[in-house]
Image (tube, rainbow, N blue to C red):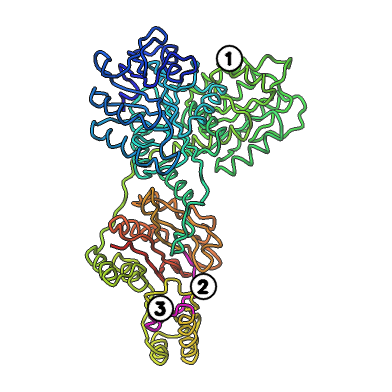
């Protein structure tokens, strides 16, 4: 990847002497950005552009050429890429559009380009992209005219060139410097995972900001992020589930594509932004030192800001510890009105003494109970006590001396704020919410980045036995499993509620009496995946008469709704009451592979949709996060007379499912619903299971 960013020579294809020629603009950008290597212009006709000769073939260029950029009709690229391969060019940027994004029948053209590249070992970005910028060596390849912008710690990647230009302008306005920019386009050859791996080794890059519309190689993306300790900020657009298909299991129905993407990003410590403006907030956040705890001191000029900050801190899990009494007493001497109770957040009201502000900040930074400061100002001209502009160098020094972040919000006229930003490289946020959000991003990254090195926990199980069950089902051309799903779960050590089969009503009554009442009856059919929807479940049966009646009722209902199903009879289980109903499952995502799901179970799974998920294989921390990720997580604790659920047992079950689907890729979907966790919190067991496997 390094040669893509640091080539010693570039050939620009599609150059002419016409003043409206886009290839000419690329050459001018390279000149204006002071590209350190050789520039070769390639066009159909000989001539000159900015003092450089236009060659009619790359074969006429003297010496070696390391990289090429194409801005020519899509159909003309294959023969010219072939010439590049023969010339020894091994890196390229294909800016040209007109490939599969234009119409599906252009896929063959993409395959042709990809084949030539593979034959010669050419790595390329695009097609359908804006190009690449590297301010370290002056390489600027967009076909629109560009001006130098502030360089700094950010490497920016976008799938859309237009969004890239918007973010460059937005970051520039926020005094956020960019050292590298990549427009990814169709990602036919090089994608975000490849670039992330390179940027981890790039000394100029301190953080990576990405705008993505799709992540085609999800596991590749996750692996690349795991290898870096740098902040990775992603704005993932195209989040609707319109392309997702409803699958056979409950798990697949609730695990839509964007939820999977969100889970994957959390799992590898990606900071997810929700909008272009939030990208700038995140980039500004990581200009500050790490936030090593979640305790925040908030100083504001107004009670309204104090309320907003308090709300935002609680929403984002940040604490507001009490201030030392001595500090409060000292501050009270400088607040003129004396009508505001000083606490955290501290409303300083009419105090405009910036020296006192500095003293407060210094003393709070010295407190071991404070991990970060949020400082808010309202910009006013001609206020007593000096000018706000004097505080920025001091705040920057204090922040780095104490290695604690100071999130500074300056509210006021946009022109005034822009002027302040242009004269300072200190991160400035436009609202109290932005400042608190920035601190939360810092805190979250510091906590999760260490987990990137965690190893998945794989649990051994009887793989040959599981494979035999799957093979037997496939021999019978069945991909939807019910009783076999329970057998597979037993192989990996998932406890199942004991059940027994009965082929007729009398046998069912005898089995129920042997198990002890009350009991549950369920239809036994390899062709019916969702028993409830078939009317195939009867609960809380108290005697043999009710069992016989239920047998007749559920078998008749199942035959009516699924006339072609093979009905083997019923299964009978002991009824478990006063138990939590949970869902554990697996779904397979096209981009990320097997996804383990945990949440509230029962018949209202799709209605409540209270689930969390992580990409398999799981680490122990992943499993713990899943338990804490559902909205109804309190039901896992002591709840209405029930003892707390054994979290370690739940973690083990999630790790077992993760190990199963990691080792057996034919398992596409799996539901354990419900997993019953009774009042003792210990004797949990699966009441029902269903599985979908892929055909041979």
Left or right of 677 in this view: 295: right
Residue at the disc numbered 1? 423
Locate the N terminus by quadrant.
top left
Q: Quadrant of the C terminus?
A: bottom left
**Label number found at residue 578:** 2
Q: Is residue 566 magenta?
A: yes
Residues at badges 2 and 1 in contact (C-beta under 8 Å)?
A: no
Relative height, residue 625 to residue 695 (above, below): above
Q: Residue at x 39, y 74 (%)?
A: 527
Element at label 1:
helix
Of circles 1 and 3, the one toward us is 3
Relative to residue 229, is residue 547 depicted above or below? below
Q: Is residue 329 left or right of residue 511?
A: right
Q: Circle 3 sits on which residue?
A: 565
Q: Nearer the viewer, mark 2 or mark 3?
A: 3
Asked which quadrant contains residue 667, the reply is bottom left
447 magenta-colored: no
Label 3, residues with CA under 10 Å away: few <14, some 14-19, many ≥20: some
């Amino acid at each position: 990847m390094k040669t893509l960013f640091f080539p010693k020579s570039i050939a620009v294809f599609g150059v002419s002497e016409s003043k409206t020629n886009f290839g000419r603009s690329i050459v001018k950008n390279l000149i204006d950005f002071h590209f350190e290597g050789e520039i070769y212009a390639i066009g159909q006709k000989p001539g000159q552009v900015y003092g450089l000769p236009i060659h009619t073939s790359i074969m006429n260029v003297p010496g070696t050429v390391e990289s090429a950029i194409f801005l020519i009709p899509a159909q003309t690229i294959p023969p010219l890429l072939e010439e590049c391969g023969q010339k020894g060019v091994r890196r390229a940027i294909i800016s040209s559009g007109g490939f599969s994004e234009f119409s599906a029948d252009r896929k063959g053209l993409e395959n042709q380009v990809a084949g030539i590249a593979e034959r010669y070992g050419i790595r390329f970005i695009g097609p359908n992209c804006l190009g690449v910028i590297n301010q370290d060596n002056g390489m600027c390849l967009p076909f629109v005219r560009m001006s130098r912008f502030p360089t700094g710690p950010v490497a920016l990647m976008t799938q859309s060139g237009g969004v890239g230009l918007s973010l460059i302008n937005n970051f520039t306005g926020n005094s956020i410097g960019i050292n590298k920019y990549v427009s990814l386009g169709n990602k036919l050859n090089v994608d975000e995972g490849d670039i992330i791996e390179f940027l981890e080794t790039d000394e100029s890059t301190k953080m990576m900001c990405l705008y993505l519309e799709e992540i085609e190689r999800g596991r590749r993306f996750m692996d690349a992020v795991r290898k870096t300790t740098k902040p990775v900020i992603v704005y993932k657009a195209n989040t609707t589930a319109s392309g997702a298909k409803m699958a056979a299991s409950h798990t697949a129905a609730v695990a839509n594509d964007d939820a999977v993407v969100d889970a994957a990003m959390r799992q590898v410590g990606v900071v997810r932004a929700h909008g272009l403006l939030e990208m700038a907030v995140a980039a500004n956040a990581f200009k500050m030192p790490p936030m090593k705890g979640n305790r925040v001191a908030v100083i504001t000029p107004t009670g309204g800001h104090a309320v907003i900050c308090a709300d935002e801190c609680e929403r984002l899990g940040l604490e507001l510890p009490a201030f030392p009494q001595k500090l409060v007493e000292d501050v009270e001497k400088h607040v003129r009105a004396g009508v505001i109770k000083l606490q955290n957040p501290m409303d300083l009201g009419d105090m405009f003494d910036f020296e006192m502000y500095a003293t407060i900040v210094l003393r709070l930074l010295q407190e071991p109970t404070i991990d970060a400061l949020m400082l808010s100002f309202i910009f006013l001209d001609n206020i007593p006590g000096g000018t706000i502009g004097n505080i920025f160098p001091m705040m920057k020094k204090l922040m780095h001396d104490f290695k604690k972040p100071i999130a500074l919000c300056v509210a006021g006229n946009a022109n005034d704020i822009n002027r302040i930003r242009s004269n300072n490289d200190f991160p400035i946020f436009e609202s109290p919410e932005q400042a608190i959000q920035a601190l939360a991003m810092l805190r979250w990254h510091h906590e999760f980045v260490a987990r990137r090195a965690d190893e998945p926990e794989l649990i051994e199980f009887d793989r040959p036995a599981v494979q035999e069950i799957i093979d037997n089902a496939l021999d019978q051309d069945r991909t939807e499993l019910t009783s076999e799903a329970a057998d597979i779960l037993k192989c990996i050590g998932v406890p199942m509620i004991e059940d027994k089969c009965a082929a007729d009503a009398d046998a069912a009554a005898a089995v129920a009496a042997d198990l002890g009442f009350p009991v549950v009856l369920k239809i036994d059919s390899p062709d019916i995946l969702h028993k409830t929807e078939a009317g195939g479940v009867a609960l809380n049966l108290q005697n043999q008469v009710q069992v016989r009646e239920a047998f007749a009722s559920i078998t008749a209902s199942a035959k009516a709704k699924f006339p072609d199903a093979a009905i083997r009879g019923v299964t009978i289980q002991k009824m478990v009451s006063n138990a939590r109903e949970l869902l554990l499952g697996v779904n397979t995502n096209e981009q990320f592979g097997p996804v383990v799901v945990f949440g509230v179970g029962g018949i209202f799974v799709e209605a409540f949709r209270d689930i969390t998920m992580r990409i398999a294989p799981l680490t122990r921390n992943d499993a713990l996060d899943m338990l804490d990720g559902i909205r109804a997580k309190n039901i896992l604790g002591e709840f209405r007379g029930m003892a707390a659920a054994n979290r370690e047992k739940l973690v083990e079950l999630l790790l077992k499912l993760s190990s199963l689907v990691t080792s057996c890729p034919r398992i596409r979907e799996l539901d354990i619903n419900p997993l019953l966790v009774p009042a003792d919190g210990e004797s949990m067991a699966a009441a029902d299971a269903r599985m979908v496997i892929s055909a041979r």
